[in-house]
Image: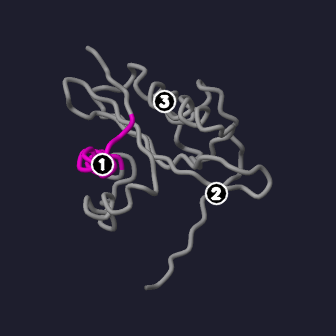
Amino acid sequence: MEVIVRAGEESDVPDILRLVRNHAKEDYNFDIEENSVEKMRKEFDFFRSVVAEVDQKIIGMAIYSFTYRTWRGQGIYFDDIFVEKSYRKQGIGTQLMEFMLNDAKNVGIDRIYWMTSENNVKGRALYEKIGANIMPGKCDCNIGIKK
């Protein structure tokens, strides 16, 4: 099986959103209704993606964007990663992460940030494998802005 890992393109948005929705349903038991193919295409310049393909089918993805931290400067915020169940345990998640790390390095960024839940055992194992420093006690915060 040949796995091709490459930068995501706008034409990949339907498959990326399919994987995001599968991730939400499989791992968190909820549906994503706030995002759409149209919205992702409109906002494509706000994020980067990396996809994994097997036989021209996208079976994995990671999404990230540029950020700025007042204490450190430029960085990347890693938002999501997902590989279809039948392709897991084959190093594809590692390849997606390594692509993102190389992308950061190529544009002069030396730090990637993200949040993960304490019970994300498989994800944490992947992150530790690539050298991540997982800090205890962190929580993800957000606030909605009414339109």
Label 1 or label 3, whichever comes before in sequence order: 1
Q: How many marks?
A: 3
Residue in front for this viewpoint, 89 or 48:
48
Residue highlighted by disc 1:
10
Residue 137 vertical placement versus 133 (above, below) = below
Alpha carbon separation for disc pair 2 and 3: 26 Å
Observer-nearest of 140 and 146 = 146
Q: Are marks 2 and 3 in contact (CB under 8 Å)?
A: no
Q: Secondary structure at mark 2?
A: loop
Q: Main secondary structure of the magenta part?
A: helix
Q: Residues within 10 Å of mark 2 (few under 14, many from 20)?
A: few
Where does the image place residue 37, in percent across and percent down from the top left? 25, 58
Q: Which residue is mark 3?
A: 99
Residue type pointed to by label 3: Phe
As shown in the figure, which amino acid type bears the numbered disc 2?
Cys
Determine which quarter of the picture holds residue 70.
Answer: bottom right
Q: Which residue is mark 2?
A: 139
Numbered badge on residue 103: none
Disc 1 crowd, CA 10 A, few/some/many (<14, 14-19, 20+):
some
Q: Secondary structure at mark 1?
A: helix
> Is 134 displayed left or right of 57 in the figure?
right
Q: Amino acid at mark 1?
A: Glu
Task: Name the mark nearer the viewer: 1 or 2.
Answer: 1
Residue 16 magenta-drawn? yes
Taking the magenta stretch, the answer to whether it contains residue 6 is: no
CB within 8 Å, label 1 to label 2? no
Q: Is residue 2 left or right of residue 132?
A: left
